Every structure is written in structure tokens, then in C-alpha cells.
Image (cartoon, grey):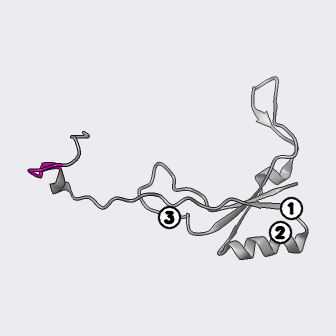
Amino acid sequence: MTARIFKPAKNAMQSGRAKTKEWQLDYEPEQPRAVEPLMGWTSSSDMKQQLSLHFHTKEEAIAYCERKGIPYQVIEPRESLHRQIAYADNFAFRRAEPWTH
């Protein structure tokens, strides 16, 4: 029962950074999922897959795992490259980049 501690990535359907500031703890699956033969649904008897804990800091999540004796793995977040561009740059006289859209 290994736990993963990570910061969730931004949802592709949203433009803001909501729900990406907290750290999340998810458990690795202990058993593989099985396909139910009648309806074709996937199921598992591992109830820890449904559990997701949220913490304000990485240190709180690590302290929780150490207090409960849970082996854990910390996945550090990658910083996204954010370029500040303006709409007027598309029509600049000397554009350094080729037209992209």
C-alpha cells in the first residue's frame, strides 16, 4: 500500500489554476481492476483507490504518512512555462516568430 503525494495538474477544460494549490495523497492500487462480464464495467475490491486526501503543504502530507506508517512517494510538480504575449504582437511589423494560427 504505497501512497503518492503530488500537486494535481490544471484541468484541460479550465483556464485558471483552481484546485491546483493543495497537495493530494492517492493510494497505489493493490489489485488490478477486473471487467464485469455482464455489463462490461470495470470494478475492484480495493477500496483505497477511492480515497483521496488533500493537504495544504507537502510537509503535512509527509507527516501524515509517517504518522500512519504508510510508505510514500513524493512527485514534485513541474513549473509550466508561461509566456506573456499580447494580441497586438500578432500584427507587429517585425515578428520574430512565424504565424502560428
Q: Nearer the viewer, residue 14 or 82?
A: 82
| Front of the two marks 2 and 3 | 2
Q: Which residue is mark 3?
A: 18
N-term-proximal mark, 3 vs 1? 3
The answer to whether 31 appears left or right of 18 in the picture is right
Q: Amino acid at mark 1?
A: Pro
Pointer 3 with pointer 1, Cβ within 8 A: no
Horizontal and vertical percent position of residue 23: 65, 67
Mark 3–mark 1 distance (CA, rounded to whole Å): 29 Å
Horizontal and vertical percent position of residue 79: 51, 61
Q: Which residue is mark 2?
A: 65
Q: Secondary structure at mark 2?
A: helix
Q: Nearer the viewer, residue 37 or 29?
A: 29
Mark 2–mark 3 distance (CA, rounded to whole Å): 25 Å
Q: Secondary structure at mark 3?
A: loop
Q: Give the overall secondary structure of the magenta segment.
A: loop
Q: Quadrant of residue 42?
A: top right
Any mark on residue 71, and which? 1
Q: Is residue 38 magenta?
A: no
Magenta part of the chain: 90-95
